[in-house]
Image (cartoon, rainbow, N blue to C red):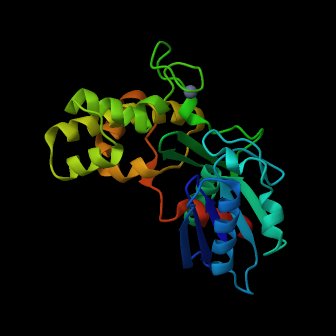
Amino acid sequence: MGIDIGGSHVEGVLITSRLGIIKQVREDILKRDRKNFLKTLDDTIKELNDKGVKGIGFGVPGPVKNGVMFWSCNSTFLEGIDFSKIGMAVSKNVSVDNDVNAMAFGEAFARKKGNLLAVTLGTGVGGGIVIDGKPYNQRSFAGEVGHMSIDPTGIKCTCGSRGCWQEYVGSRGVERLAFKHLGRKMSPADAYDLAARGDGKAKKLWEEYGCFMGVGLANLCNVLDPEVIVIGGGISGAFQFFEKSMKKEMKKRLRMDIPVIEKAGESAVAFGAACMAKS
Ligand SMILES: [Zn+2]
């Protein structure tokens, strides 16, 4: 069983030993407080639970130590929850890791690849690194790719630094580009819809967005040289509109062949969490 803990939802999957998803549940957290969250989590686990469950994994939106998520930027009601203790009620085989690490691990595991980078594009931008088949998470803060600066005098980030990648490719970045190309503030979902309807200016927005994606991914390729890059998170829905300019920008900046770059699979975090418990 794999559980994806989000700030506003809980999603769970049950997978087979051959990695097929056989059951999937998604519940919204109606009120963002600890009591409501624990009830939603309990309901999700109950709905998925099966006598044959051999392990349970959690992907949580923050850094983890000893099964406890100890810090969260956006969902403080999750801080201090001991997920390994909750998992023990289902199986003795419990795994808890950061959500992007879980996604990266699952994608690498399913593709039988040893070296993979996963990037999630949402309000924040996260990264998960798999090296030699293992999630790289040495001191709990590895993979914070969103705070890699791509402009020393650039936009001020919530972390206090300047020019952080997430200010260009996270949802605030899309909003800024919408202002530039379309003259108004717009959510990534609306900018996607507009491009899908064939709007030329919206397509230009995504083209420029792809350049910023390419700059960041080229930096990461120079450090990690992954075999595969997987892109997840809400904004990855617009992949088709930024793929071309992203790859073009990467090719301009890299001396190596660019790796395979794909959108993450369905329920990628929950699936990855289940793979972690399985392995
Ligand atoms: Zn930052």
Q: Is residue 267 left or right of residue 192?
A: right
- Residue 215 drawn at (x, y percent): 42, 30
Taking the image in four quarters, ligand 1 sits in the one at: top right
- Residue 135 drawn at (x, y percent): 69, 50
Q: Is residue 279 visible?
A: no
Of all residues shown, which one is farthest toward the top? 153
Q: Where's the C terminus, which quadrant?
A: bottom right
Q: Is residue 88 left or right of residue 12?
A: right
Rendered view: 97 above or below 21: above
Residue depicted at x 74% and y 47% = 79
Q: Is residue 150 visible?
A: yes
- Residue 218 drawn at (x, y percent): 46, 33
Q: Where's the N terminus, which quadrant?
A: bottom right
Residue depicted at x 85% and y 72% = 92
Q: Nearer the viewer, residue 243 or 166?
A: 166
Q: Is residue 87 left or right of residue 73?
A: right
Q: Nearer the viewer, residue 62 or 42?
A: 42
Residue depicted at x 65% and y 53% = 33
Q: Nearer the viewer, residue 34 or 5?
A: 34
